[in-house]
Image (cartoon, rainbow, N blue to C red):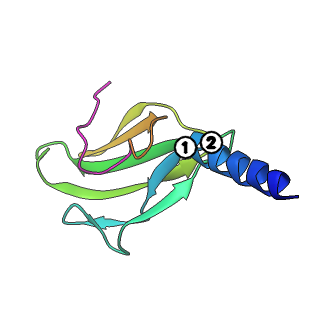
Amino acid sequence: MENLLKLCLFLLCFETALTLQCVLCKSYKNRKCVDGNQTCTAQPDEICIIRRTWYASDYENLQSAESGCNKSCELDEKFSGDLIIHTQCCDDDFCNDINLPIMMT
């Protein structure tokens, strides 16, 4: 019985080590998460995502951002009036942190 318990504990640790961890934040203000730092564990069909929005004339001043785990994600950059909406996808732990550099398309 003890060996079975050890095996289950090992498998649980092994599974936890292989799961993708992403930054989860519904809203950023001043480059910090409004609700504090959170994480989400991506399901097997999910990936980390971060979406940033800023004015085209002012790359330094982020208007809004959101990050988390998502099933569908495509690297994308859209223009809506004078706003740029940049979506980035990644599959390394915490690769969607707001402080990491933007990979432009």
Query: Is 102 colored magenta in this rendering?
Result: yes
Q: Main secondary structure of the magenta part?
A: loop
Q: Residues within 10 Å of mark 1 (few under 14, many from 20)?
A: many
Q: Residue at x 39, y 47 (%)?
A: 51
Horizontally, residue 105 falls left or right of residue 21, namely: left
Estimate the x, y position of residue 44 in percent, counting from the top left.
Answer: 69, 40
The secondary structure type at the circle numbered 2 is loop
The image quadrant where one finds the C terminus is top left
Query: Is 24 colored magenta in this rendering?
Result: no
Q: Please tell me which residue lies in front, 96 or 5.
A: 5
Amino acid type of the residue that numbered disc 2 sits on in the rendered structure: Glu
Task: Say if mark 1 contacts mark 2, CB within 8 Å.
Answer: yes
Estimate the x, y position of residue 25 in percent, counting from the top left.
Answer: 42, 63
Q: Quadrant of residue 33?
A: bottom left
Q: Which residue is mark 1?
A: 20
Horizontally, residue 72 falls left or right of residue 36, namely: right
The secondary structure type at the circle numbered 1 is loop
Q: Which residue is mark 2?
A: 46
Horizontally, residue 27 falls left or right of residue 15, namely: left
Q: Could you tell me how far apart the alpha carbons at marks 1 and 2 are, in whole angstroms?
A: 9 Å
Q: Residue at x 71, y 54 (%)?
A: 9
| Extreme-right residue of the structure | 1
